Image (cartoon, helix red, strand yellow):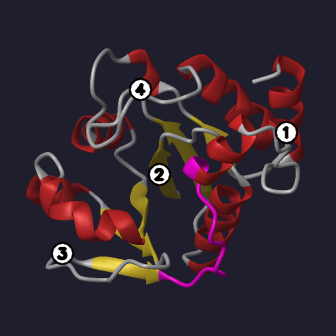
Amino acid sequence: MKKIGLFGGTFDPPHIGHFIIAEEVKYQFELDEIWFIPTNEPPHKAQAYFSPSERLEMLQRTVDKTPGFAVKDMELKRQGKSYTIDTVKNIVQHHLDDTFYFIIGGDMVEYLPKWEKIDELMELITFIGVKRPHYDWTTDYMVQQATVPLIDISSTYIREQMKSGRSMKYFLPHEVYCYRKDYHK
């Protein structure tokens, strides 16, 4: 029986903050694996800047040599909006002997009441939340809290800086930086 953390997100692009969170949660909760699950179309955001195949490639390049990390493309294969309830139901049905945890940022802790079928989802999985600056930890839902060093960066900030010509070399994993540089995005 494995303990697996599911880390969903747009990863537009994946940055060092994502991987610090994954590593810290894996360690603190003694998880065997972290599965990065890039969304196709998040229900609460505009369309991603990078294409689904680009985001998948950047994630795969970064986690390929990291024991205990994997990328799952199940949401990218679905058409339309990606709802966590659909993904979790599918995973749980196919991995009956494993225990799953869903990793979310503090911004999503506040947003939980708006999640599709949140009460059903809470029955299927344990949520692990990561504090983020400028967000309260206000929720009526049971969310375990991970303590992660404060890395106050976001994919939005990185995209804005890249568009203005900045390299963002130290904000991105080396593999993501090289991928982006190779494709001049």
Report x, y in % for residue 69.
Answer: 68, 48
Question: What residue is shown with label 4?
Answer: 40
Question: What residue is shown with label 1?
Answer: 177
| Residue 58 sits inside the magenta stretch | no
Circle 1 packing at 10 Å, graded few (<14), some (14-19), many (20+), is some
18 relative to 158, above or below: below
How far apart in space, not on screen, are marks 4 and 3 (Cα)? 26 Å
Give the mark nearest the N terminus, 4 or 2.
Answer: 2
78 relative to 40, above or below: above
How far apart in space, not on screen, are marks 1 and 3 (Cα)? 37 Å
Magenta range: 146-156
In the drawing, what numbered circle is on residue 141? 3
Give the mark nearest the N terminus, 3 or 2.
Answer: 2
Q: Nearer the viewer, residue 82 or 94?
A: 82
Which residue, as the protein is rendered here, is positioned at the far front? 164
Element type at mark 1: helix
92 relative to 55, above or below: below
In the drawing, what numbered circle is on residue 143? none
Report x, y in % for residue 180.
Answer: 80, 29
Give the mark nearest the N terminus, 4 or 1.
Answer: 4
The label nearer to you, 4 versus 3, is 4
In the drawing, what numbered circle is on residue 6? 2
